[in-house]
Image (spheres, rainbow, N blue to C red):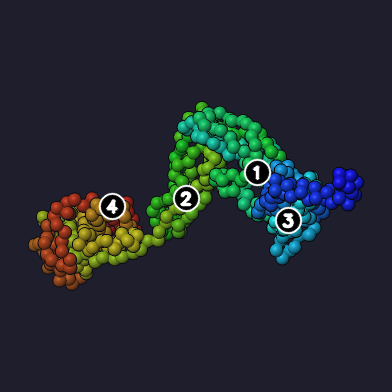
Amino acid sequence: MKKKLTNNLLLKIVSVIAAVLLWGVVINIDNPTDTYTISGIPIRVINEKQAITDNNLTYELPGEKTVSVEVTVRRQDRRKISADDFSATIDLNEIYGATSSVAVNIEVVNNKSLIRSWTQVTRSVRVDVERMETKIFEIRVIPKGSLEDTYTFSRNTVSPGSVRVTAPESVMSRIDHAGVELDVNGATDNVQETGPVKLYMDEESRNELDLSDPRILLNVTEAEVTLGVVKTNQISVDIQVTGQDAVADGCKYINYTCDPQMIQVTGPRSQIADFAKLTIVEDLTGADGNVTKSYKIQDYLPKGLEVADGQPGTIEVTYQIDRLEQKSFYIGRNQIRLLGMSEELEYRFGEDDGITVTLRGLSEDIEQVTVQEITAILDVEDFTEPGVYSCEAVVELPEKYRDYFDVSVGSVRMVVTRPESEESSSEESAPEDSSAGITEGSTEESEGERPDANESEAVSGIVSGTETASGENSQENR
């Protein structure tokens, strides 16, 4: 029996097969397979130069830059499999224009024998492609901090003076300027420093562009800057007007407006201390309307002084010249006073019971004057003999109108007689006239009310003669 068992070939073969099957069963029970996902496989880009760089383009993967696969391995081999066992590539020559996507190719590069099977999870990725731009930006000095009081910035120098920037269109559109920051806090003298060149996205240099993007290329990364710091002084602007009384006929100079009225200048301390104001002289002779002029400040500064940074370079001055208006007022005899009368003579007007006074001045001033505010004075002291005299009145205006107007007044005929020979004097020396005699202090009524006595006593603006404001009294004795 034993011999039959040991010499039976068929039995031996069956036994081997059964043993193998039994071993497989044991292995499957004791070391089963697991299926799981491996993530973080980095994407490698190929054909970048041919498809992108040579065409002056750039690209970006806006989403995840890694892919995943699902693998099946024996449980005891699971720890041996990682993302390093796979290779993921994208070919930029295969970008699909409609969706800007490209297929991901994944291969097993290590431990192939341990991986029972695997399935690609990420099959494509999005690639954003845009054109590259190159621009040159002047490098500015960006001061940080505050200078000491009464100091300001003067000229600055930057070496190199500009930077060439190459970046995607979307990035370039956000760049406003380039600059180097310089700490000037408390400085009273020039400041010099070498610093990194930065790109800013706004005029105020507040928002700095992140330069960590490898697609942003600068031909220089540092620059040496020097910022001048000088003493300042605030001075006034002094406008001196000449010819204001010689403007065109019918016009009057009123005033001027100046902008700015104060300016800041820089220069040597000793020279600044001796310069207190900037003087501008303007001749308005013959001007017939408003005059506006612009003066370059530097032309009026002594050699060595300059306009401080941030200050306007010009001064704008407007000289106001208004056209004069005329208005006539009829003054009745109750508003005319006689001075220097003799008790031995009587005085009366010739043909008129009053006089016409013409004021010439600014329309807004003339409109405020009323006839009751005007008083006329006739000086008859020199009329010592009976007769007919032609004289000019002196016009009195309230103090509030002093120097406001040019005054003209017509001549007045005055008839002087003696009481005892009044009739003969009238026949020989005067035309027929029904006017009553005028004595000093007469209160006879005519057009308009006589001004209050107190107001008359307070009158001090006296103008006489034709077309004059000098206050001189011109008389003609006939």
Alpha carbon distance from label 2 to label 3: 84 Å
Front residue of 434 and 36:
36
Residue 469, placed above or below residue 275: below
The answer to whether residue 397 of the structure is visible from this angle is yes
Of callouts 2 and 1, which one flags the residue occurring earlier in the amino acid sequence?
Answer: 1
Q: Which marked residue is nearer to the observer: mark 2 or mark 3? A: 3
The answer to whether marks 4 and 2 mark residues whose Cβ atoms lie closer than 8 Å is no
Question: What's the residue type where badge 1 is placed?
Answer: Leu
Q: Earlier in the sequence, mark 1 or mark 4?
A: 1
Taking depth in this image into account, of 360 and 300 the one nearest to the observer is 300
Mark 4 secondary-structure assignment: loop
Gap between marks 4 and 2, in whole Å? Answer: 28 Å
Among numbered discs 4 and 3, the one appearing first in the sequence: 3
Residue 51 x, y percent position in the rendering: 80, 56
Check if mark 2's residue and mark 3's residue have beta carbons within 8 Å.
no
* Residue under numbered circle 3: 119
- What residue did someone put label 2 on? 317
Sequence-wise, the earlier of marks 2 and 3 is 3
Q: Quadrant of the C terminus?
A: bottom left
Give the label on residue 402, or none: 4
- Mark 4 packing: few (<14 Cα in 10 Å), some, or many (20+)? some
Type of the residue with mark 4: Arg
Q: Residue visible at 32% across and 57% down?
A: 405
Q: CA distance from mark 1 to mark 3?
A: 39 Å
Label 2 to label 1: alpha-carbon separation: 49 Å
- Determine which residue is flagged by label 1: 211
Q: Amino acid at mark 3?
A: Thr
